[in-house]
Image: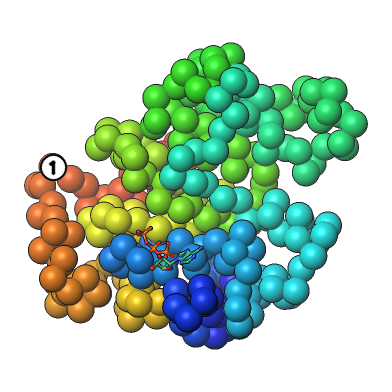
Amino acid sequence: MLAIEALTRRFGDFTAVDRVDLTIPTGQMVAVIGRSGAGKSTLLRMIDRLIEPSEGRIRFEDRDITALKGASLRHWRRDCAMVFQQFALVDRLDVLTNVLMGRLDHTPVWRSLLKLWTGDDKAIALSALELFDIGSLAANRAGALSGGQQQRVAIARALVQEPRMILADEPIASLDPRNTQLVMDALLRVNRDFGITVLTNLHSIELAKRYCDRLIGMKAGRIVFDGTPAELTDAAVTELYGLEAADVIEIPSAADPTPDEIRAAWDAARAREPV
Ligand SMILES: Nc1ncnc2c1ncn2[C@@H]1O[C@H](COP(=O)(O)OP(=O)(O)OP(=O)(O)O)[C@@H](O)[C@H]1O
């Protein structure tokens, strides 16, 4: 379980995240929503300690994340993988090597420097790519892939870290609708099949409702909504987004699957797979 207490981040006189309290049980898929500048990225980046909190505490099970340094901070960053909007792959390296980077903390330094990955590591990396239907791209240069393919490579790299939690900071912001769906499906799969907690910032309320169990709404650095997709009424969206509400309330098409249909499809797919 992740437990955040009175977490605050100030930039000069400006408070970007303001005394946030939040508890996330293991295995939830959670979206952080809210208008631009609400503090969503700052909150996620504090959890991974890419941004240092000004005040407050982050705990994960029995670890005080806010106090970690050196090797223990590195271990936390292995347990808590980040997925970024711009993928953060090494463009000139092939896809498989990019995914193997996720194994670095499981590999002695001398082996990784010499690129002496074990057969097991390569098999793990390849099966992660296959899980997201991009196994055939393993030998391609990462920079030559489409945005949606690159993001699935980044999720595969996160998965092979064997994390307890994945933080995805606007993972679909630069993708077209088809790739958006493939990347959201990949995150859902990581969550449902591996029980890994996923916490993601999303601009689309409709996607957040369709894919996530729980929505956290931020406004001016504070949490002003915390509930299920069904509880996020149009009135709650208006409270969260103010005058921008009309822009973010999308009318779902009849062809779009409902959250229950998506979850049922995943449960059925998992039941069909050999153990
Ligand atoms: N390094 C920084 N220095 C000064 N101000 C910052 C810094 N990082 C973030 N901020 C400010 O903190 C506020 C919250 O930023 P943050 O990126 O967390 O918002 P967000 O909700 O993720 O927005 P978006 O959806 O546009 O990415 C913004 O007003 C931003 O300008």
Is 94 displayed left or right of 86 in the figure? right
How many numbered marks does the figure carry? 1
Q: Residue at x 46, y 36 (%)?
A: 151
* Residue type for callout 1: Ala
**Element under disc 1:** loop
Q: From the Cβ of disc 1, is ligand 1 less than 8 Å away?
A: no
In percent of the image, x 65 and y 51: which residue is there? 163
The quadrant of the picture showing ligand 1 is bottom left
Tell me which residue sits at (35%, 66%) in the image. 37
Q: Is residue 192 above or below residue 72?
A: above
250 with respect to 180 (left or right)? left
Q: Which quadrant of the view contains residue 200?
A: bottom left
**Residue bearing mark 1:** 255
- Residue at horizontal 57 percent and vertical 83 percent from the top: 5
Q: Which residue is at the front of the view, 262 or 40?
A: 40
Q: Is any atom of residue 127 visible in this view?
A: no
